[in-house]
Image (cartoon, rainbow, N blue to C red):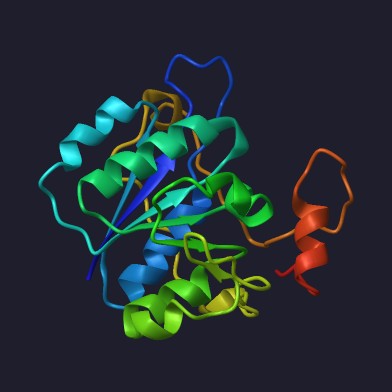
Amino acid sequence: MKILFLAPFARPTATYYAGINLGLAQLAAVASDAGAEAEVRNFWDAAQLDEFAGRRFDYVFIGTYTHQLKLVRQTVNIMNAMGLKVVLGGLHATFAPEDFADSPYYLLVRGEGEVFTRQLISDPSRAETMTGVWHPGVPGKGFAPMEQNLDVLPDPFRYLAVTDKVRNIMGFELLSSRGCFYKCAYCSAPALSGIYPGYYRR
């Protein structure tokens, strides 16, 4: 099985640092560990997707951020036109899945994606009926199960191609926990803690 992981990204000319998408990098590592062939790519313009024309993937995972909603919708349409099955996940898909009601995605996953990704690779038909999985026009129920033990997760994939903004940073990002016990109003962590009891893990 071949899976492409696409991360909508800030343009290299952006004045702020956007970082790499560690969520997709983690899912790609999980997919590879489960026996799939995984590729992770950043992009910031729909025109960049032309390079995937003619390439065959079993699934295309796309991370969703609110500030990249327009680009994500364009990407879903383009990937669908290429005959590829799009799986949406990430924060915007988790908290506002109805915003993709008119998008021709294949599946939408609300919540964390590691358990779903393993299931999709081992048995796609069971993954499609998991809790937290939506189908176009058929809202799902609840949220996808989370991985309780972070120690079983492989190290996140490194990107095949990153922007100079990331490449020139003297250092790298490292997360040794997931979630947060603070209640900052501008952050998604409190809402995620409401979804998943015991969300903060180390």
Q: Quadrant of residue 118?
A: bottom left
Residue 6 at least partly seen: yes
- State the quadrant of the N terminus: bottom left
Residue at image location 33% in from the left, 77% down from the top = 121
Q: Is residue 41 left or right of residue 176?
A: left
- State the quadrant of the C terminus: bottom right
Residue 1 to residue 108: above or below? below
Q: Where residue 140 sits: x, y (%)?
A: 59, 70
Residue 160 at least partly seen: no
Residue 80 to residue 57: above or below? above
Q: Where residue 135 sits: x, y (%)?
A: 48, 65
Which residue reaches farthest left?
54
Residue at image location 29% in from the left, 39% down from the top = 78
Residue at image location 45% in from the left, 14% down from the top = 13
Q: Nearer the viewer, residue 154 or 189?
A: 189
Q: Is residue 3 left or right of residue 56?
A: right
Q: Where residue 156 sits: x, y (%)?
A: 44, 59
Q: Nearer the viewer, residue 175 or 86?
A: 86
Residue 62 to residue 112: above or below? above
